[in-house]
Structures are given as structure tokens and as C-alpha cells.
Amino acid sequence: MKRNRIIAMLLGTALLVCGCQQAPEATDEEKKIEAQKGTTKTEEKSYQGKLDLISPAAYNNVDGLKLDKGDYISIIGKANGTQYWEEVKKGVAQAAEDINTALGYTGKDKVKVTYNAPDNADNVDDQVNLLDEELDRYPAAIGISIVDLQACQVQFDLATDSEIPVVTFDSGSDYQGVAADVSTDNEAAGKEAAEKLAEAMGDTGEIALFIQDSKSQAALAREKAVTDELTAKHPNISVVNVYHMDELTTMQKTIADEINAGTYRPADSELPDGVLTEENAVTADSITEDQVVDYILAKHPNITGCFAANGDAVKLAVDGLERNKMEKKVKVVGFDANADEIKDLQDGKVDGLIVQNPFGMGYATVIAAARASLDMGNEAVVNTGYTWVTKENLKTEEVQKILYAK
């Protein structure tokens, strides 16, 4: 019995000693891996909802992208400074961070991804110059949102000759050698915008279209989708005017000619009636864009609907309708979701917005460019998704997770 008690005491002491011993400390590498896992989980909560909209799903993660240390990927946007393009830039930066984290690259070993763009979205020459500069740096791949559909053909030929793959995003190109196009499905989004606007108008009336430009693929696709959908399915609605914001000079001359001929007078004009003399004639360059919008609205006082193809176009239309006291009778549907648009939506000045996914677009463009540089193959089209947003669904979780201005 005494022997058994001694054995039991020894066993108890051994268990106590073992229980008090600490687990061996993790190695530096193990700590690094755990830290990366924790960081990834935290970050995913803030942006994963935007990545979930991307299709195919291969473009919403960095799996399998075994880029070499120090590889360089160049991303060229249409503009700097606006909320939309800042969100694209954030997506680009996040993809770069995720790639380097996954590969364990730090310091000089990091894959370098840059974002550059013209200061203004319609500056074709500046964008072409940027593309020339980036090609001279021989990046592993280039991603570009093209200002002018026809402007970069020579540079794309040069990229092909230099074996630098090109990915387009947001607004693409007809160039046959593009590795992938990462964008909103503008045809589907335009059709939905037309349907929603027709519904808000009671399926009858006149519509004016405000389009950001006359030369980018995205702008032209949205314009065509809206007009085709209305023509095919809504015969009681007619498009009475299409204004392209890059055609200001043409409109200025038209308005000045009418004012000078005495066939048109702005509402607040103090000019005399009839034909103006050379002394008091109006010059084309004195006509502002606001006056162009006022002219359009004066020529079409019976419109009850307005489609605006991006954030700048929405602001132009909403401000014009307010100046001309037409905001209560005209329904407005537009694209994007900057702070002004969200406020106008909340205030009832805009009836609905097609909200794109610029963060996902930037992210997926880097993934597509990386895949192209590794000869992994790409889908011809990567759809980054969009969401229909109204005042009624603005506060829902589904909408909040994709907004970039709240």
C-alpha cells in the first residue's frame, strides 16, 4: 500500500511539472506566417465584398501568382483625384500588397505596381505620353483604361513587339492583342438603367442623355445600351438629345450662332431681341458648359427623364435641372457613386444609380496583368460587377459594402 502511495505521489508531481511547463516559443518564421494570416483576415472584412462581385473568381485573389522578385507592373488610369479613380488606385495597391504578402517579398524584393494617370479624364495626349514612358521601362505587364478608343494602337503594337502583355480595364479597346478586358458589363448595366428610368417615368415621355465623352468604349457602350433598350422595349419614350461632354466647343459655336442670329436667348440674357450687331455679338468661347445645359433644357422643355453616364455627367444634369426649376418633374438615373451623387440620391434629386466596382476593377486588373506576365492564360473579359442603388436600399448591408462614398 505504501509503495502504491509513493508511485501515485510521483505521478502527480510529474503531471504538475508538465502542466506548468510552457509550450516551446514559435520561431520567427512561424510568427510571421501567423501575423500574415491575422492581417489578411482583418483586411478581408473591409474589402472582400467588393472582390466577391468579380467574375471569374480567379481574379479576386492572388493564388498561384509566382512573380519574380522585383517584377514591375504598370497600371495607367484615365484620371487622378476623383473618388472613382482613387478607389481604383486603392484596389491596385491592395492587390500589390496581397501579392507580396503571399510571396513573402519585402524591401527591394517586392513586386512593384504603380498607378499613373492624366490629371484630366479626357486628356488623350497625356495618357499616350504616359504609355510611351511606361513602355520604355519594360514592365512585366501593363494595364490601361483607354481615354480614346483609337488612340493607342501604335503603342500596343510596340508592346506586342516587346512582348509586354497589355490588359485593358474600365474602358477597353478593339485591339486584337489585348490579354484581357477588366470592366463593368456596360451593356447589361446600360439596359438596366434604361429599364429603371422608363419605370420611373411611367413608361412614357422624352429623355435627354448626358454622356461623359464621345470616344471611350465605356461611354459609347452605355449610350448605345440605353438607346437600344428604349427603342426596342419602350416605344412611348423618345431620346430627344444626346450631349457628349467632350463636344463643348461644337455646342458653344451652335449656341453663339443662334444668339447672334436672334433665334435663341438665354433665360437671364439682357441682350436685345433680333440679330446682334458685330459690336455686341457673342463669341463661342464665352459660352460656359452650364449655359450649354441650359440651352439643351430650353430646347427640350418637356423632358421627363434624364440619363447620365458617369458622376460628372450626373452633376451636370442635376445642377442644370435645378437652375431651370425642372428637378421635380424630371427623373434622373446615372452611373457611379461619388459623395455628391449619394447626397443627391438621399435628397431625391437622383432616382437611382448604377454603382460600379472600381476597387474590384483595380484589384482584378493587377491580377490579370500578373497572369498575363506569367503566361497563365486569361479570360477575354473579367466582369467586375455593378449594383443598382436607390434611396430605399442605400442603407442595406449589401449596398454599404460596395460603396466608396457614403
Image: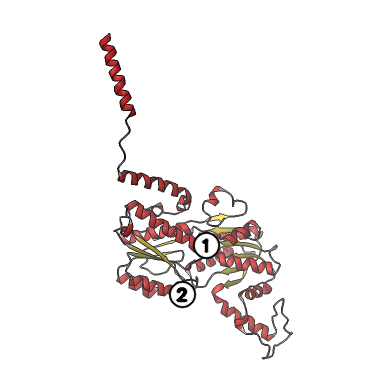
Observer able to see residue 60: yes
346 shown above or below 76: above
Residue at image location 48% in from the left, 60% down from the top = 87
In which quadrant is the C terminus drawn? bottom right
Viewer-closest of 56 and 212 = 212
Q: CA distance from mark 1 to mark 2?
A: 20 Å
Give the vertical position of 308 relative to 46 (above or below).
Answer: below
Q: Position of residue 190 (x, y in %)?
A: 54, 62
**Residue 280 percent location from the top left of the image:** 68, 88
Task: Name which quarter of the figure residue 108 lies in.
Answer: bottom left
Identified by mark 1, the residue type is Gln
Helix, strand or loop at mark 1: helix
Question: Which residue, given by chain and number where applicable, does mark 2 sit on?
Answer: 124
Question: Of helix, strand and loop, which one carries label 2?
Answer: helix
Hey, which quadrant is residue 361 in on the image? Answer: bottom left
Of 344 and 83, nearer the camera is 83
Horizontal relation, residue 342 to residue 221: left or right:
right
Taking the spot 63% from the left edge, 62% from the top edge, the residue there is: 332
Residue under numbered circle 1:
83
